[in-house]
């Protein structure tokens, strides 16, 4: 880690020598660290998306709690088909990833 680098703080315009954080206001001024931080936040946001329940699954879960019995029975019937479709899809995805690897 040789050499010196002056970085102008984008927040308070103060000059900083070999620092990752601004000497006067504490803002992150290291561009490399900034990018790394942004990358981590994006990766975290991506991870959180699949945790949200599937719209169709949510619909069936609501329908299976319907106050009318015939609606509940029909919903349970289609929900079981949906569950089979999902499990076959998961199995196929697993098989494809296994073959590809
Ligand atoms: Zn500053």
Image: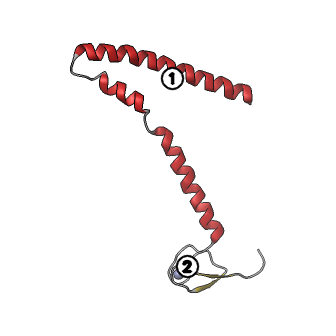
What's the residue at 54%, 56% (across, down)? 41
Q: Which mark is residue 10?
A: 2
Viewer-proximal residue among 78 and 99: 78
For the residues bearing labels 1 and 2, Cβ distance under 8 angstroms:
no
Q: Residue at left 46%, top 20%? A: 83
Whether the residue under disc 2 has CB within 8 Å of ligand 1: yes
Say which quadrant the C terminus sits in: top right
Residue at screen point 60% across, 66% down: 34
Residue 44 placed where, x, y %? Answer: 53, 50
Name the residue rendered at 51%, 79% in the picture: 11
Residue 22 quadrant: bottom right
Q: Quadrant of residue 55?
A: top left
Q: Is residue 98 left or right of residue 69?
A: right
**Secondary structure beneath label 1:** helix
Instruction: Look at mark 1 in the image and give the residue it sits on.
Output: 86
Measuring from the top left, give residue 50's x and y in whole percent: 50, 39
Q: Where 70 sits versus 7, above or below?
A: above
Mark 1 and mark 2: span between their CA atoms?
Answer: 50 Å
Q: How many numbered discs, if any?
A: 2
Q: Is residue 75 above or below residue 18?
A: above
Residue placed most toward the observer, 1 or 94: 94
- Residue 69 x, y percent position in the rendering: 23, 14
């Amino acid at each position: 880690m040789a050499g010196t680098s002056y970085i102008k703080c984008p927040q308070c315009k103060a000059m900083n020598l070999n620092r990752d954080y601004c000497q006067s206001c504490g803002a992150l001024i290291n561009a490399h660290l900034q990018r790394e931080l942004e990358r981590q936040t994006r990766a975290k946001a991506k991870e959180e998306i699949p945790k949200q329940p599937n719209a169709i699954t949510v619909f069936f879960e609501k329908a299976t709690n319907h106050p009318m019995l015939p609606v509940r029975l029909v919903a349970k019937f289609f929900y079981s088909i949906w569950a089979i479709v999902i499990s076959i899809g998961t199995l196929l995805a697993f098989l494809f990833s296994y073959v590809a690897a």
